[in-house]
């Protein structure tokens, strides 16, 4: 395994651990505080976990030479992107339905200071990911799947932060 491949593998594993841990924290706090924003962001984190797993698998398979019967493994990242996109569309629909329901029958939010704290920590996790993969866009499947540049990633982080404050 090359040095750059090993570095990418280590960064992906670190971010995978961090994102998975924070997914669990967000979903638990989101349900405990009745915060739709935290629950929605936790499932967004879950989609990031899926994308990071796909990126990790592609880093593991990248040094291999595929001589025949390559359609399945060589295109695994495309299939993973499709699964991730379908998951995000379903997530958006469920958030829309829940927000419409809460618009007509508002629910009480418990412990707003805890929601702000977890939302701020979520912003920090996203910023860590931004700076961790800043120099290796070609190795980060998330940016390949979504075809984002650094400006759109920054806008995404800001939108996540703003949505968690609501």
Image (cartoon, grey):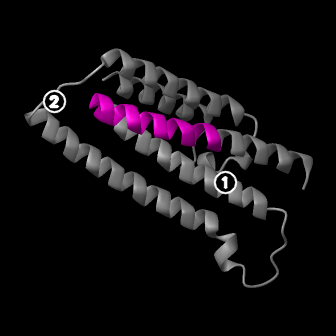
Quadrant containing the C terminus is top left
Q: Which mark is residue 55?
A: 1
Q: Residue furthest right?
A: 2
Residue 97 vs residue 71: left or right? Answer: left
Magenta residues span: 16-36
Q: Residue at x 59, y 27 (%)?
A: 127
- Secondary structure at numbered mark 2: loop
The answer to whether 89 appears left or right of 108 in the picture is: right
Q: Is residue 110 left or right of residue 142?
A: left
- Disc on the earlier residue, 2 or 1: 1
Residue 109 higher or lower than 48, as above or below:
above
Residue receiving disc 2: 107
What percent of the width, then of the height, locates residue 27? Answer: 40, 38
Cα–Cα span, label 2 and label 1: 39 Å
**Residue 16, image x, y percentages:** 63, 44
In the displayed structure, 42 sits above or below 84; it is: above
Task: Name the magenta segment's main secondary structure.
Answer: helix
Identified at 55% across, 67% down, the residue is: 79
* Nearer-the-camera pick, 93 or 108: 108
Tell me if residue 131 comes above or below residue 95 in the rendering: above
Q: Residue at x 15, y 36 (%)?
A: 102
Which image quadrant is residue 131 in?
top right
Residue 112 covered by magenta stretch? no
Left or right position of 39 against 108: right
Disc 1 is placed on an element classified as helix
Residue that extends furthest to the bottom in the rendered view of this protein:
69
């Amino acid at each position: 395994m090359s040095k750059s491949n090993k570095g990418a593998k280590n960064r992906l594993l670190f971010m995978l651990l961090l994102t998975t841990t924070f997914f669990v924290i967000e979903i638990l706090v989101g349900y405990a505080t009745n915060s739709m924003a935290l629950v929605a962001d936790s499932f967004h984190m879950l989609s990031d976990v899926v994308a990071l797993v796909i990126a990790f698998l592609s880093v593991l398979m990248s040094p291999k030479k595929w001589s025949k019967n390559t359609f399945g493994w060589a295109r695994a990242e495309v299939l993973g992107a499709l699964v991730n996109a379908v998951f995000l569309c379903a997530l958006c629909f469920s958030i829309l339905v829940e927000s419409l329901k809460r618009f007509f029958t508002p629910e009480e939010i418990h412990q707003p200071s805890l929601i702000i704290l977890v939302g701020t920590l979520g912003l920090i996790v996203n910023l860590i990911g931004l700076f961790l993969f800043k120099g290796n866009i070609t190795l980060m499947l998330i940016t390949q799947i979504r075809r984002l540049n650094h400006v759109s990633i920054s806008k995404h982080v800001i939108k996540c932060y703003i949505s968690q404050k609501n």
